């Protein structure tokens, strides 16, 4: 066993992680340390490794680690030194590139012994300039966020006004076409043999979205993606009285899985029966981002391709400056109004209006989520300053 002075020297200056070397937790007690040492030391004992110098060095290091951690006083010194080294690494990694450069320059001047009053003044000016730049960036971010909020409020008001105008009743056809049953039907699956998911339980769960006409169940062997063998599943076909209820079931299901995974996480592949959204459902359109913003207000961002957006919320976008960006609310267009006396592919005006209102609510929820994330980023920036 090494002397007390040598142990303290190892505790204070060793760069090795003795806990990781023995494979134990930092909170391990004496018995756990002794057991781990005996188990690990057997692998590198001189009687087994012969002239393997690397293994012999490892055995010696294990002995040092055991001696340091077995002595409470020396272990306390080692824990403090180890914690100080880790905290130093964390502090150094938290420096920005500019602060790290300033820190390295300052340490170099201190080692060379050339630090003086003039250099201190220059450092103070650089630090002041750095803090001013941080404040300017924070103020600029707050201004741009306020401008975006104003733009979102205006676009939301325009969207609500457009929805209000579209609510105006149009002349109804003399013989309106009923929505096809397949367009009001969803399908899902869950492992066969689930005792608490019979026809009545499914009806009770999925009636939260709207009235159900009937529920059909059948068992089928399916090979899940990534699996080698087929498994028994129960396929459920749910027919709603309204396409609005079916649309709500499909679009709300992902949110319910996150909020109540114990209930809704048992279901897989909740989708339209046809495998795609019915053509009669209004599709929100996204035009190219307009260039109406002033040249000096915000940095230019990369444009987004024009195309049809899905009925569920789109994935969040990032600009090249790290700020979230969503399609303009004013760019979403509802389904064009049908000609007088002609049904809109079987979807009546009330159902179309309800679906468009739900799409508007989803867009509002997405905008609020992005606003919250930007506020968190702004708070993080202020903490760094």
Image (spheres, rainbow, N blue to C red):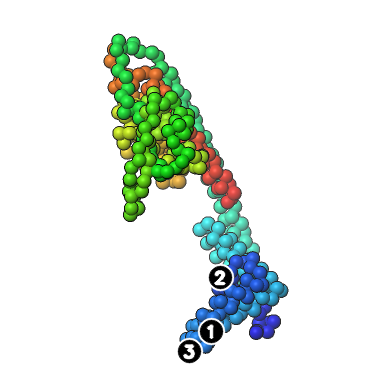
Q: Residue tagged by mark 1? A: 45
SS assignment at label 2? loop
How far is the residue under mark 2 from the one under mark 3? 25 Å
Determine which of the numbered discs, if any, sits on residue 51 in the image.
3
Along the polypeptide, which appears first: circle 2 or circle 3? 2
- Left or right, 132 with respect to 195, comes to right
Q: Secondary structure at mark 3?
A: loop
| Residue 39, percent from left and from top | 56, 76
The answer to whether residue 9 of the structure is visible from this angle is no
Answer yes or no: is residue 180 visible: yes
Label 3 CA crowd tier, 10 Å (few <14, some 14–19, many 20+): few
Q: Residue at x 45, y 46 (%)?
A: 322
Alpha-carbon span between mark 1 and mark 3 = 11 Å
- Tag 1 or tag 2, which sits nearer the N-term? 2
Query: Residue at point 30% right, 10% down?
Result: 174
Q: Are marks 2 and 3 in contact (CB under 8 Å)?
A: no
Q: Residue at x 57, y 45 (%)?
A: 379
**Could you give the CA–CA distance between mark 2 and mark 1, rounded to whole angstroms?**
17 Å
> Pointer 2: what residue?
23
Where residue 49 appears, as percent x and y from the top left, is: 49, 86
The residue lying toward the viewer, choosing from 310 and 85, is 310
């Amino acid at each position: 066993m090494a002397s007390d002075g040598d142990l303290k020297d190892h505790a204070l200056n060793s760069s090795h992680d003795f806990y990781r070397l023995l494979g134990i937790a930092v909170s391990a007690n004496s018995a756990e340390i002794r057991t781990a040492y005996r188990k690990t030391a057997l692998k590198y004992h001189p009687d087994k490794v012969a002239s393997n110098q690397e293994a012999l060095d490892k055995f010696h290091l294990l002995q040092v680690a055991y001696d340091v951690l077995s002595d409470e006083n020396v272990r306390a010194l080692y824990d403090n030194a180890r914690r100080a080294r880790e905290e130093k690494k964390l502090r150094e990694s938290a420096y920005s590139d500019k602060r790290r450069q300033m820190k390295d320059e300052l340490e170099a001047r201190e080692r060379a012994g050339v630090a003086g009053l003039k250099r201190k003044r220059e450092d103070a000016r650089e630090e002041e300039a750095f803090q001013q730049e941080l404040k300017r960036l924070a103020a600029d971010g707050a201004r741009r966020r306020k401008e975006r909020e104003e733009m979102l409020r205006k676009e939301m008001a325009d969207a609500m006004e457009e929805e209000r105008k579209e609510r105006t009743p149009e002349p109804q056809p003399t013989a309106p076409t009923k929505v096809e049953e397949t367009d009001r039907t969803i399908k899902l699956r869950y492992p066969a043999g689930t005792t608490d998911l019979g026809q009545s339980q499914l009806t009770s769960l999925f009636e939260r979205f709207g009235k159900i006409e009937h529920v059909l169940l059948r068992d089928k062997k399916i090979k899940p993606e990534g699996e080698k063998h087929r498994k028994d599943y129960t396929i459920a076909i749910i027919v709603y009285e309204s396409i609005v209820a079916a649309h709500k079931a499909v679009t709300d299901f992902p949110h319910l899985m996150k909020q109540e995974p114990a209930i809704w996480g048992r279901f897989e592949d909740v989708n339209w029966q046809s495998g795609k959204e019915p053509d009669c459902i209004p599709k929100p359109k996204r035009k190219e981002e307009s260039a109406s913003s002033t040249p000096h207000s915000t940095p230019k961002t990369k444009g987004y391709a024009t195309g049809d957006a899905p009925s569920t919320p789109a994935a969040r976008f990032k600009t090249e400056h790290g700020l979230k960006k969503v399609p303009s609310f004013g760019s979403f267009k509802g389904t064009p109004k049908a000609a007088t006396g002609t049904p809109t592919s079987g979807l009546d005006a009330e159902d179309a209006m309800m679906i468009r209102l739900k799409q508007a609510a989803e867009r509002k929820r997405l905008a609020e989520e992005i606003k919250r994330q930007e506020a968190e980023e702004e708070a993080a920036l202020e903490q760094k300053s």
